[in-house]
Amino acid sequence: MKSSSIRFISVLVAAALFAAIGLWNEVNTWNRLLTSSNNRLVETARVIGLHTDDVLALAEQPLADLTLKAQAATGYTSARRHVLDEMVRWKQTSQVVRSIDYVGPDGRLLGSTQASSTVGSDRSSWENLRFHRQNASEETYIGTAIRDGSDDEWFLPISRRISAADGSFAGVMIATVDLDRFFRFIESFNPGGDSAYFLMRGDGQVLMRYPLRPQGMKAGLADIDFFASQAKSGTEGNHQYDAPGGRGPRMSGYVSSEQTGVTAIATRSRSALFHSLLVRSKYPWMTMIAAYILGLAITFRWLRQIRLREIGDQKIAAREAEFRLIADASRDVIEKITIDGRRDYVSTAATRIFEQAPEALVGTNVLDVADQQARDDWQAALDRLKAGSSSESILMTRTRSDGSKMWLESVLSRVNGETNDSPCSIVVVTRDATRQQLAKQELDALAITDELTGLFNKRHFNQQLGQMVMRNAPMSLLLFDLDRFKLFNDTYGHLAGDGCLRDVARAIRETLQGTDAVAARYGGEELAVLLPGYDEPMGLQVAENLRLRIRSLQIAHVNNQPHGVVTASLGLAALDPKHPMSAEALISAADEALYRAKNMGRNQVVSATADLARPLAAASA
């Protein structure tokens, strides 16, 4: 009766847990949907930004050519006609340009490829003209969108200043691009009805909105100052803002172009995204609830039958589990032990793996081992099995009779007795895991080693530096590179350069042998050494030893005069516990010292705290 009550309560607890898991899963689904949607918004903004860069680059091509021709034609009527002919040619060959306008310094149109434009018409109201009149820069300027009164179409004016020979303002060359070109591109990837897309200039001016709204280009966009600040820093990311007019939160992805300074922004409604999740989850939830109720009914119906089968199943499962474990792992050592660790059975594989006869091991205890760590691991595993764990594993080492080291992996499985009163036993399967452990150690070493030099790589070096800085103990950091090494590669070839780096790395290891130093290839020909426990004087001595050792290799370098051999310049920064420094600050100080060493003639050691370079690299050295 007590067992039945426990099962009933267990079923209710399981049902509640199942419901909680379902709710937790929906919360996770919503979070994943948010993350996925944010990623898609950034990717969409990136695609639109790249398309915008391409369109603006194509539109800028005729401007670069025509501006030069217009500047040369300033004051010459016949030459100006040649410029107009070139404008027509560029318009015909350009894939993106809508029209090209030549505007004089007074704002009057001197010529245009647009048939509807009238020569002499006033363009003074255009933003581009005002900008170039006030700025002598010849950079390309992207103006805000303008609506053409003749065909009611929107276009972007892109312009360059025309300067007279004396540098005075002589007009503007303007190429226009239809906004419809951007609209068609956005429509090609089927945007949702709640989506909106913007192009924003670095000063916060919105150049384009899709879809167009009567409220203007900024309709539905907020936090313009934020997006403008991102445009100046050339970054990308996500930003959530409240839409104007109380229309709820909107998600956005933005990408700022370093090429044009234009930020592409893709937005969508967060509420609409949540609504789509509800619609999508409605029927699965209804199905799950129905299955949930049906499952409860079936579970309660068969609780009694389960109880009646348990006793017989336990006996069968105990025998079958013991048999399978012994039969399936016959090539490994199979042991049957008590819950306290005494061996009742040992398979014949013990002769090969343990180098002991099975009969000699029967009756002994697994805790009777010389290695304290192995004894503790065995005891902890047995304690967990006593507490109810069904399976445990142990990885340990042993020394073979020939002195070599091997790894053993033991898997312990608890086998319950045939009745509740019967004691349980443990089946242990032990295999030789030496090959796998050696492979793992080799992979671990490769992950922190530079392939060319055999020194540590930059990632491992930075990890070690961070740990040492956190301990705030005395330490010296050396940064150095080989003098004029690029000329070495140019003269002797990159294979010789690789050989030189290997020789230098070997010399560094020999010089630092017996110390706790961490030597790494920091990048290219740049090397770095951490000297834990070394103050500045001690670090300078090691640095000088390294400099002399590298020079003593006598590797020919005809372009490294006056020495004629490979030499090194070293910068040192020391960490004083009284004046803690960050890892970044320490690297920066050593790098500055290295820079000074190179500027002061190379082949020398300079400390970050020294007023002048130490004269360690004498002319005769």
Image (cartoon, rainbow, N blue to C red):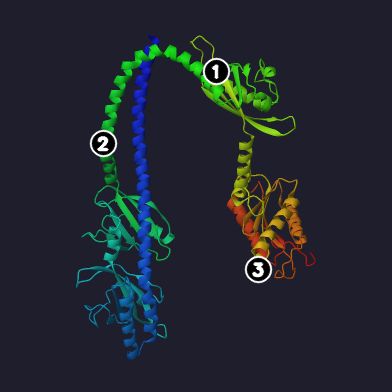
Distance (Cα) linking label 2 and label 1: 46 Å
Horizontal side of residue 475 vs 316, given as left or right = right
215, 291: nearer the viewer: 291
Tell me the residue that label 3 is attached to.
487
Residue 443: give x, y in percent of width and height.
60, 43
Callout 1 amino acid: Lys
258, 505: nearer the viewer: 505
Distance (Cα) linking label 3 and label 1: 70 Å
Q: Residue at x 58, y 22 (%)?
A: 428
CB atoms of marks 3 and 1 within 8 Å: no
Badge 3: how crowded within 10 Å, few (<14), some, or many (20+)?
some
Q: Is residue 324 visible?
A: yes
Q: Earlier in the sequence, mark 2 or mark 3?
A: 2
Q: Earlier in the sequence, mark 2 or mark 1?
A: 2
Callout 3 amino acid: Leu
For the N terminus, which image quadrant? top left
Horizontal side of residue 180 vs 384, given as left or right = left
Asked if 57 appears above or below 103 in the picture, the reply is above
Badge 2: how crowded within 10 Å, few (<14), some, or many (20+)?
few
Q: Give the quadrant of residue 218.
A: bottom left
Tell me the residue that label 2 is attached to.
282
Tell me the residue that label 1 is attached to.
386
For the C terminus, which image quadrant? bottom right
